Image (cartoon, helix red, strand yellow):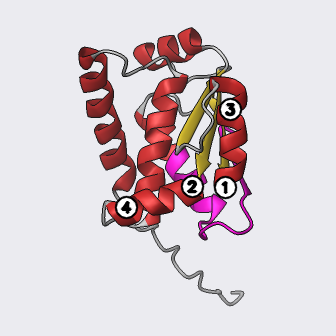
Amino acid sequence: MPADVRRNAKRSPALAASTVKRVATQLLAELGLADAELSVLLTDDATIHRLNLEWRKQDKPTDVLAFPIDERAGRAAHERKTGGRDVVLGDVAISLDTAARQARSRKRDLMSEVRFLLAHGVLHLIGFDHGTPREKKEMVALTRRLVRASSTKAPPARRARKATRRSPA
């Protein structure tokens, strides 16, 4: 299963894990990593605050955290468009509380904000960063491309023709 999405945010804004899973699958496919494994945690500010303090020594909640397993393997699979078979990218944690506040301030819906945060987090998993102006420019451009690609609606599924029952001859 390429993307596994779990929700652990009982009092946070509603957002279906299945919707985020669909977006995550689209993001991975756009990156040429359709078979790579990704874990996503939809959580609240308290949990992401603890994670941020433990792993980044930042004593505050944040919007998204990325925990790569092997950035080089993910980046190599992405660059070669190998499909990411046998590549475990890592984990992305998103605070639905922070995402909802940011969405309101940016005048967009929660799913649009989560899509952006997920794209950002996945890029971190495959080794992209925004520490320098050049890196930031590249990462922003890639994030926007991923958001656009995962925002397009899939074409409607073809309806199966109704089987007609033939009478025996």
| For residue 101, above or below residue 72 | below
Q: Comparing marks 4 and 2, which lies closer to the viewer?
A: 2
| For residue 18, above or below residue 127 | below
Q: Residue furthest front?
A: 59
Secondary element at tag 3: helix
Mark 1: amino acid: Asp
Mark 3: amino acid: Leu
Mark 3 and mark 2 residues within 8 Å of each other at the beta carbon: no
In three-dimensional space, the C-alpha distance between marks 4 and 2, rounded to whole angstroms, equals 14 Å
Dot 1 or dot 3, earlier in sequence = 1
Residue bearing mark 4: 153
Q: Position of residue 133 (x, y in %)?
A: 24, 18
Q: Comparing marks 2 and 1, which lies closer to the viewer?
A: 1
- Which image quarter: residue 97? bottom right
Dot 1 or dot 4, earlier in sequence = 1
Labelled disc at residue 20: 2
